[in-house]
Image (tube, grey):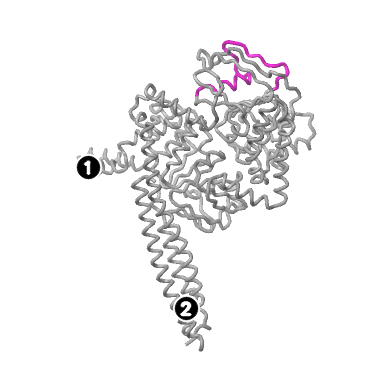
Amino acid sequence: MAQKSGEIWTGPRLLRPVRLKFARLLDFAPMLNIDHLSLRRGAKPLFRDATFQIHPGQRAGVTGANGCGKSSLFALLRGELSADAGDARYPSNWVVAHVAQETPPDPRPAMEYVLDGDEELRAIERGLAEAEAAGEGTRVAELHGRLDAIGGYDARARAARLLHGLGFAPGAELRAVAEFSGGWRMRLNLARALMCRSDLLLLDEPTNHLDLEAVVWLEDWLKAYRGTLLLISHDREFLDAVCTHVIHIEHEQATLYSGNYSAFERLRAERLAGQQAAYQRQQREVAHIRGFVDRFKAKASKARQAQSRLKALERMELIAAAHADSLFHFEFRAPDKLPNPLLRLEKVSAGYADRTILQGVSLSLAPGDRIGLLGVNGAGKSTLIKLLAGEMGPQRGELTPAGDLRIGYFAQHQLEQLRPEWTAFEHMRHAHPNVPEQEIRDYLGGFGFAGDMALASVEPFSGGEKARLALALLVYQRPNLLLLDEPTNHLDLEMRDALALALQSFEGAMVIVSHDRYMLRSTADRLWLVHGGRVTEFPDSLDDYPRWLSEQEAAARPAATGDEAVAEYSAAARKDRKRNEAELRKRLQPMRRELARLEQEVARFGVEQAALSEALGDPGIYAEGEKARLMRALADKARVDELLDSTEEAWLLLADEIEAAAAEGGA
């Protein structure tokens, strides 16, 4: 009897239905499920047994060092790579959108290119054309009904709003795609991805080709996005504003954290601070900042800088530990001379050929000035930087540099001036032939070019690696005036933190243009606004700049946007949409809490069921004298089976209800 019962009640046979039930649950669950994933690229392992789940409506930032596998994860989800082991799955009916990296020289208008992002819209339009040509009245009516259901009649208005938000001027939607430069084509690709009514949106560094105004707009758009978002970004404030979760990839593992990037960073800082070496390194970084404050807070000429460091210190204490294992550590050497003023402009006008961009600009730069430039795209920020750098002369007025002025100028075209056949070491040796080899090697190591990396040719370097090398060349020059035009493009979070820390102790003057608000907050003491051809002090804080932009847009809208589609995107419509979304979130919140509770119950009952199955699989339970224990186990097993079935059914019904409500209401 015992042997026969043992054959019937074997553990594997009892556990198999449980596994199948959980598998069915995951198949039906509307979520992204990464299950024991292992992935290699060539000989390099990227993931080993990684497991996490992202649920609908969650917006997850994907972070980690360059080369850790962030973009490979996206390629896997797009079906361009196959897992070595494990699984990455999401519902088969999900529509996945991503930003294409290449844009063909399309002769069609930008509007038509962006509308292609909504594939169902285009399919219906093609079907309508065919049905109308064939005189199929019933089919035409059906397709018009479907067009109305997906908001097809408003599609052009939606595309116009996307283009407007991403910085395209009115009328640009009529220009051929082929007429736009590379950076603007990337914006078109982003608009096309956002045009897709997707369930899963994959964005890999979407802010790289945007200015601050477009970044602020995209931030708001993504916060209202209804689907599931995976976002790779090195912009700390962008991640903070958009993300509800963070997936951090490190040591071939992917760990899911709840909360935005700052919350993740605090948790990681606490973990690293528990390691003595990391803690000691953190204290050295903090002492470096405190030393500056202690030395200069009593000096009137340095008071503003000291106050800036004090404001940054609290945050620096947190991030120092979180990034204690960073590869990047460097600082600006003291300039040889610090003349005052370094540069003076008197009633200067500047522009290109017969077109004037800036006019009547009067300003002076002195050691210790730390200026952040604000202004909409095309206002003249880069023109001002080029004027200060001496790359263009004034049309009128006087520009007077100090005799000992030494400018360190960083712009994206500096990357193109690197010699692709040279190594990082050769670039440094060419610029500084008398510096000892070991000093150059040690210096390059602080920028991540250690060992063989310093002796590798630049040609295959990534954009981030080239940007790091250009910065390394600039820093070693000992400039007394730094001009930085979008220095953080292509730099990862670790390098951005290292640059911000180095700029904190820079003794010369600095003028920076950046869409990275964390970089501006960490390094700039004053804000200048480039607007209407003038350069003036921005009296408010960086937090007030989006409000200023909205006011400017509202004031300009009647004159600048005759297009009915764009004008429709009014403040009242935004207010109504946000109110409706808030009401829907409030209504769904208790349902989502209940869903999470049911999910925990399913897991708990599954564990209990497995334990009881294992107990019943033990032949000893069927021995003489164990009848009472056997009866209790059988009763408990029947009870847990029923509870698990009913809880799973309730979970599925509630998940369907939430999904339907979200689709109907737009959450």
Q: Is residue 37 above or below residue 244?
A: below
Q: Residues within 10 Å of mark 1 (few under 14, many from 20)?
A: some
- Residue type at mark 2: give it: Ala
Tally of numbered tags: 2
Q: Which residue is mark 2?
A: 633
Asked if residue 212 shows in the view, the reply is yes
- Residue 513: x %, y % from top left: 58, 28
Could you tell me which residue is drawn at 53 percent across and 17 percent down? 358
Q: Is residue 386 magenta?
A: yes
Q: Between marks 1 and 2, how big is the CA–CA gap?
A: 62 Å
Q: Residues within 10 Å of mark 2 (few under 14, many from 20)?
A: some
Q: Is residue 618 left or right of residue 440?
A: left
Helix, strand or loop at disc 2? helix
* Of residues 179 and 438, the one drawn nearer to the viewer in this rendering: 438
Q: Which residue is mark 1?
A: 141
- Residue 141: x %, y % from top left: 22, 42
- Residue 41: x %, y % from top left: 58, 50
Magenta segment boundaries in residue numbering: 378-406
Asked if residue 413 shows in the view, the reply is no
- Residue type at mark 1: give it: Ala
Q: Which mark is residue 583?
A: none
- First of labels 1, 2 by sequence position: 1
Helix, strand or loop at disc 1? helix
Closer to the observer: label 1 or label 2? 2
